[in-house]
Image (spheres, rainbow, N blue to C red):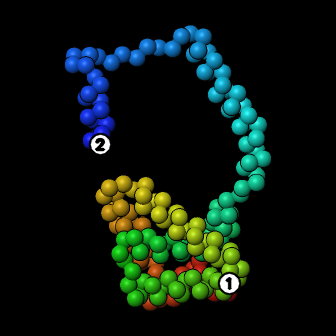
Amino acid sequence: MPFGIASATAMTRKPGATTSYAAPKAGRCRALHRRPTLALLAVGALAPGIAGADEDPYGRARADHPDLFRVYYDEGVMEYCGLQTRNSMGGFFLQRDQLLESRPMSAADHRAVRIAASIAVDLEFDNRGLGGQRNWCRTAGLDAYGRFIATYWYGPGPLLARD
């Protein structure tokens, strides 16, 4: 507690005094409850226009390019977990380059996919809580590492096979 607040409270309060809060009068309660209802109705009427005007570009990028999103997501998991090695990063670059060759996209779309994956990894890491990332690294991190290593040593898998 800051020094100024504690000392001011101690000086203004009488020893042995209790703090009590009185409930608002009945007429006031009804008026307070009406105002939020009107505000919610106004927001509800405007919500369809607001949602349509501000589309999430990263959600669209994730849906349009799920394979590339997954590659960037797995690379981000490996980065958080400290599993990046020369071989795993070589597998990442091979998978990424192959996907970009097989399905060309604009620089803006590629950037949106990278950002979407970065946001997803960051949110997942934050969602794990204190110590929860250990299990995440043992499961998702090692799976991503294994896929990238296999790509580096044995070539692309069936999902990334060249035509």
Can you identify the residue that label 2 sits on? 2
Type of the residue with mark 1: Ser
User: Are the residues at dot 1 and dot 2 in contact (C-beta closer than 8 Å)?
Assistant: no
Q: Residue furthest toward the left?
A: 15
Residue 141 is drawn in which quadrant?
bottom left
Q: Tell me how far mark 1 sits from mark 2, CA to CA.
A: 61 Å
Eyeballing the image, is 81 above or below 9? below
Type of the residue with mark 2: Pro
Q: Residue at x 58, y 67 (%)?
A: 116
Q: Residue at x 26, y 16 (%)?
A: 17
Dot 2: within a 10 Å radius of its alpha carbon, few (fewer than 14), some, or many (20 or more) residues? few
Q: Give the mark nearest the N terminus, 1 or 2.
A: 2
Q: Residue at x 29, y 30 (%)?
A: 9
Q: Position of residue 140 (x, y in %)?
A: 42, 67
Can you identify the residue that label 1 sits on? 102
Question: Left or right of 48: which side holds 13?
Answer: left
75, 150: nearer the viewer: 75
Q: Nearer the viewer, mark 1 or mark 2?
A: 2
Q: Position of residue 155 (x, y in %)?
A: 51, 88
Is residue 63 in view from this perspective? no
Question: Left or right of 158: which side holds 106?
Answer: right
Residue 22 is drawn in which quadrant?
top left
Q: Which of the image's four quarters has the N terminus? A: top left
Q: Position of residue 2 (x, y in %)?
A: 29, 42
Q: Residue at x 47, y 75 (%)?
A: 75
Question: Left or right of 134: which side holds 41?
Answer: right
Eyeballing the image, is 17 above or below 64? above
Q: Position of residue 42 (x, y in %)?
A: 74, 34
The secondary structure type at the circle numbered 2 is loop
Dot 1: within a 10 Å radius of its alpha carbon, few (fewer than 14), some, or many (20 or more) residues? few
The secondary structure type at the circle numbered 1 is helix
